[in-house]
Image (tube, rainbow, N blue to C red):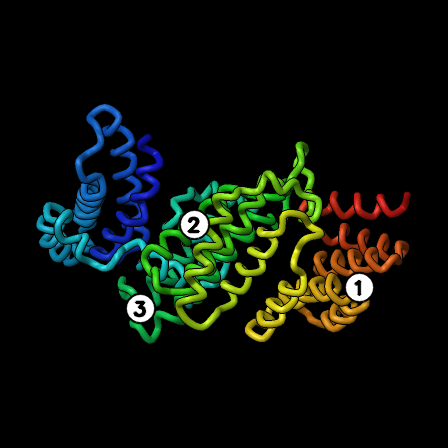
Amino acid sequence: MIEPLLRDLTPQVLGAVLRKYRDFAAAEDAVQEALIAAAAQWPRQGVPENPKAWLIHVASRRMADSIRADIARRRREEESVAEAGPFAMGVAAGYEQEEDDSLVLLFMCCHPALTTSSAIALTLRAVGGLTTAEIASAFLVPEATMGQRISRAKQSIRASGVPFRLPAPGERAARLRAVLHVLYLIFNEGYVASSGALLQRVELTAEAIRLTRALHRMLPEDPEAAGLLALMLLTDSRRKARTGPEEQLIPLDEQDRSLWDRTQIEEGISLLTAAFSMAAVGPYQLQAAISAVHAEAPRADATDWPQILALYEMLKRMSENPMVTLNHAIAAAMVNGPPAGLALLDALGGDPRLAGNHRLFAARAHLLEMSGDKAAAIDWYRRAAEKAASLPEREYLIRRAARLVK
């Protein structure tokens, strides 16, 4: 099929054209026109021998035509048109020798000048190939709002004057952390949608895995890129078991583990093993290791909770994320009893980042249920349900409370 090929080639073509012409919005428009031309011609004429070069050539012609049409930018026309001929005709040979444009584009979309929400939107649009409407639907905002967000992100990148190239080695590590973080957030939003009627947004998890896999191919020696991909694969392996026939949430300890994707689990564990041998351990590797422990347990009651607790204790020393502390409290309760976990949750009560967060309330309810305090657990489950913006999570919490009433 032509559509998957075009989707895979889009960021590479956009990167090549953007590297040459330095105008994000105009380059994206030109690439879209080239994709439309390909979708119309290739089914009739056949896919070119080098489809990427064909798209770059057509997009470059569109850019040159646009420049010619703008009299006020005649100077830019003269500079760009002078380069367009040899660039377009020699792209197949010269382009492959340049830095990988998809990777450069990914780093650019995660530029420090952008807010996290803008970086996510721009990454999905420019690198992931999702339409503005698809991104808006995923984040439950109007298409016009998302379009404005993406437009502002492009303007911010243009105003920053950042060159289209990979960051220098000294800057790359810091920028790589931002890239990994954006990919992590995209995956998480897909795995547990923050709001709406669906628990999972498969298009987002699939896109996050695809982009992270591409990043890992480009940076095979980076242990955290491998660790993040392992984490995504191990976590996503449970997708089919996480919801019932009516899209109801099924918690980890009640899932049918025969539905877990063993191929993803094996790949994730292989990636993790290789990452651990590369260098110092990072937070994505530790999170992947925790997911691996769950994945290797044949039954919920066979889970190695002491190992998970030890991994969370290591992760806490690396991360100030309150969700890590929350999960550490649950692991502590599984190993040392509910009072130990509740004491750790008490320490989180004053953290403004978790103020009113339904997951903190739900964790407290779960540990109170474990301790046998049904009345308090019902109260906290109901409070959590009131705070949850995700309909499947809200209904699950209501069911947990109702089960205890009986």
Residue 31 lies, in percent from the top left, at 28, 44
Which sits earlier in the primary sequence, circle 2 or circle 1? 2
Label 1 is placed on what type of residue? Pro
Q: CA distance from mark 2 to mark 1?
A: 41 Å
- Asked if residue 144 can be seen in this view, the reply is no
Which sits earlier in the primary sequence, circle 1 or circle 3? 3
From the viewer's perspective, tell me whether residue 302 is left or right of residue 10: right
In-front residue for pair 21/171: 171
Residue tagged by mark 2? 124
Which residue is rendered at x = 62% and y = 66% of the image? 324
For residue 338, the mark is 1
Label 2 is placed on what type of residue? Leu
Residue tagged by mark 3? 167
Residue 362 lies, in percent from the top left, at 75, 56
Q: Quadrant of the N terminus?
A: top left
Which residue is rendered at x = 44% and y = 44% of the image? 132
- Asked if residue 105 can be seen in this view, the reply is yes
Q: In which quadrant of the rendered view does residue 320 lie?
A: bottom right
Q: Is residue 7 above or below residue 389?
A: above
Q: CA distance from mark 3 to mark 2?
A: 21 Å
In-front residue for pair 343/348: 343
Label 3 is placed on what type of residue? Pro
Q: In which quadrant of the rendered view does residue 42 lie?
A: top left
Which residue is rendered at x = 81% and y = 51% of the image? 382
Element type where label 2 sits in the image: helix
The mark lying in front, picked from 2 and 1, is 1
Q: Residues within 10 Å of mark 3 (few under 14, many from 20)?
A: some
Residue 184 lies, in percent from the top left, at 50, 57
Which sits earlier in the primary sequence, circle 3 or circle 2? 2
Q: Is residue 335 above or below residue 2?
A: below
Q: Is residue 136 above or below residue 291?
A: above
From the viewer's perspective, tell me whether residue 320 is left or right of residue 231: right
